[in-house]
Image: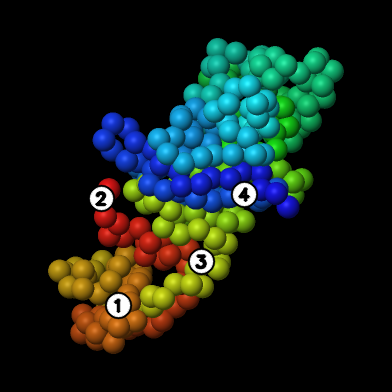
Amino acid sequence: MDPVLEVRDLRHRFGTTEVLRGLSFEASPGEVIGLVGPDAAGKTTTLRCLAGLIRPSEGQVRILGKDPQDRTSGVQESFGYMPERYSLYGDLTVDENLRFFGDLFCLDRTTWRQRRDRLLEVMDLGTFLDRRADALSGGMYKKLALACALLHEPALLILDEPTNGVDPDSRAEIWERIGEFSAQGMTLVVATSYLGEAARCSRAGILSRGRMVAFGPPMDLVRGIEEVVLRADPVDGTAEALWERLGSRRGDLGIVNLQGAHLRIVTPPSRVDATRMALEQAGARTRPVAPSFEDLFLVRTTGEETP
């Protein structure tokens, strides 16, 4: 099966700053590709290159074998792009925004109405037709933006932080829709700052300072972690007190996180014995635990060099 999206050695510079450093990946029909990383990792720049909004400094992007920079190829009709914010006209109503995007995609009235009605039902927006976009809640705004990006039924949907700033219920609903679109054969590329969302994707790419430091099925990536993960519970007192007692020694133990009533430590195998001894001396009981996607993320992004 031919890939819907191919990205090869993608590089981009703003002035002398290299913000993308050789990204390569592809996506097949029905896949959900998650791109996760901290601020300034290169997620939005990557998506803008995919959508043809930025011409990459080097490398290539192909959607259904065509360059999104080529305005004569017709490939723009094959994908939809939903930026993180400001993708709608705030002074237009829900219905008017859908009508505007229908005209933008050159849909005839019958086709537009059929797709509009279906998307209003799917996104639960039918009772908000006359409400202005800037009067919608964060979750409703995102669902309307998603509906507008889907009107032309693209083969590839590119979503930049689709759940950023929305309530948990709306976040869950948006991801339910993403799962439905994927099951229908649509390919999606989703940039997110939520590690739990990346873990739900078919394959996830972890970006750090413009590099893809890990890419693959999330659970396969987690199983590939070589580091050992320890849980440290304080014998007496609180986890905060244990954190303070460790003081400057924390940097020698590995990656140490305060998680509620305990500490979670990710440490190289060679340091396990020394780490457990230091924790016990500080007043903690330790035990190994299964690694998580968050542990993987921290391992791959901690200490990344500056480009």
Amino acid on which disc 2 is placed: Thr
Residue nearest the observer in this picture, 263 or 62: 62
The picture places residue 227, in percent across and down from the top left corner, at 38, 75
Q: Secondary structure at mark 1?
A: strand
Q: Tell which circle, 2 or 1, labels the residue nearer the N-terminal end.
A: 1
Judged by depth in the image, the label closer to the viewer, 1 or 3, is 3
**Foreground: 63 or 214?**
63
> What amino acid type should be assigned to the residue bearing mark 3?
Leu
Say left or right for 11 vs 172.
left
Which circle's residue, 1 or 3, is located before the other in the chain?
3
On the image, the x and y values in percent for residue 89 come to 55, 16
* Residue 52 in view: yes
Q: Amino acid at mark 1?
A: Pro
Q: CA distance from mark 2 to mark 3?
A: 24 Å
Relative image position of residue 185 (x, y in whole percent) = 74, 46
| Up-down relation of residue 33 to residue 112 (above or below) | below
Query: CA separation, marks 4 and 1?
Result: 45 Å
- Residue found at x 50% / y 50%: 24
Vertically, is 120 above or below 306?
A: above
Q: Are marks 4 and 1 in contact (CB under 8 Å)?
A: no
Q: Which residue is mark 2?
A: 306
Residue that numbered label 3 is attached to: 221
Q: CA distance from mark 2 to mark 4?
A: 29 Å
Q: Residue at x 55, y 12 (%)?
A: 91
Select label 2 or label 3 by which is in front: 2
> Given this view, does label 2 or label 1 mark the residue nearer the observer?
2
Q: Residues within 10 Å of mark 3 (few under 14, many from 20)?
A: some
Could you say which disc has been placed on residue 27 in the image? 4
Within-10-Å neighbours for mark 1: few <14, some 14–19, many 20+: many
Instruction: Name the residue tied to disc 1.
Output: 234
Which comes before the other along the chain, label 2 or label 3?
3
Taking depth in this image into account, of 200 and 202 the one nearest to the observer is 202
